[in-house]
Amino acid sequence: MPKFYYETDLPAPMAQCLGRITSNWATLEFFVGHAIGQLLGVSDKEARVIVTQMNLRPKLEILVLLARLRRIKPDKTARLLRFIAQMNRLHARRRELVHGVWVRDRKGNFYVVKHWGGKDQENRITGSAAPVREHDLRALARDVQGLARAFWWWWNNQTSGPLPSRRKRVAQPRSRPRNPDRNPKARVGRPRSSRK
């Protein structure tokens, strides 16, 4: 294995691509949470409360289960499963790049080290290093952005009819009477006399 140097300052184009990947992935996960919220019949805020601590895989499993519970047509469910397969494929690569350790060799080539091992006898970190080029990052950023847009467009076109609308809130009775000092219309007392 060649000698690597830890790299904490990536070239600007590579850092920009990583930023696009991260930003577009966050958007995609928001769209998945939105879809879960629609299937549950809750608002986006309520959906975020439900899915905020979940990784992507549980979100996708919930999305598929809810789609089946809501009896969404099989062709729509099949398309959803294809989207999920794309998300899983891109998720593995994104996770490597965003959470991996970046290094470079003596020639200036960049690699991402995946730390699957521990340390060897000489206290070196073991793992595998995958070469990464700028055009690989650009392609992934483009794929994630395209998937987010395609999923959003498809989901919004699918949800116009069969999904439940937002849950209607039932007015709760007040536990205490209104404060008459704060509401001038509720004041009790003698009527005002008209002065002439």
Image: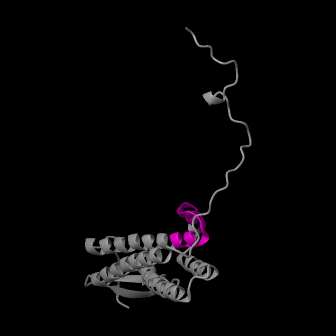
Q: Residue furthest right?
A: 175
Indicate whether residue 167 is drawn in magenta.
no
The correct choice, above or below, for 194 with respect to 132 in the image is: above
Q: Nearer the viewer, residue 137 or 186?
A: 186
Left or right: where does residue 104 sit relative to residue 58?
left
Q: Residue furthest front?
A: 196
Say if residue 130 shows up in the picture. yes
Q: Nearer the viewer, residue 54 or 13?
A: 54
Indicate whether residue 34 is drawn in magenta.
yes
Which quadrant is the C terminus positioned in?
top right
Q: Residue at x 57, y 10 (%)?
A: 195
- The image's colouring method is one colour
Q: Main secondary structure of the magenta part?
A: helix
Q: Nearer the viewer, residue 68 or 31?
A: 68
Say if residue 103 shows up in the picture. no
The correct choice, above or below, for 110 with respect to 39 in the image is: below
Which quadrant is the N terminus positioned in?
bottom left
Q: Nearer the viewer, residue 71 or 143?
A: 71
Where is residue 165 drawn, in percent x and y? Answer: 57, 67
Q: Residue at x 66, y 26 (%)?
A: 187
Where is residue 20 drawn, in percent x and y? Answer: 35, 72
| Count of numbered tags | 0
**Residue 69, quarter of the rendered image:** bottom right
The residue segment tinted magenta is: 33-50
Where is residue 182 drawn, in percent x and y? Answer: 62, 30
Q: Residue furthest bottom?
A: 1
Where is residue 80 drawn, in percent x and y? Answer: 50, 84
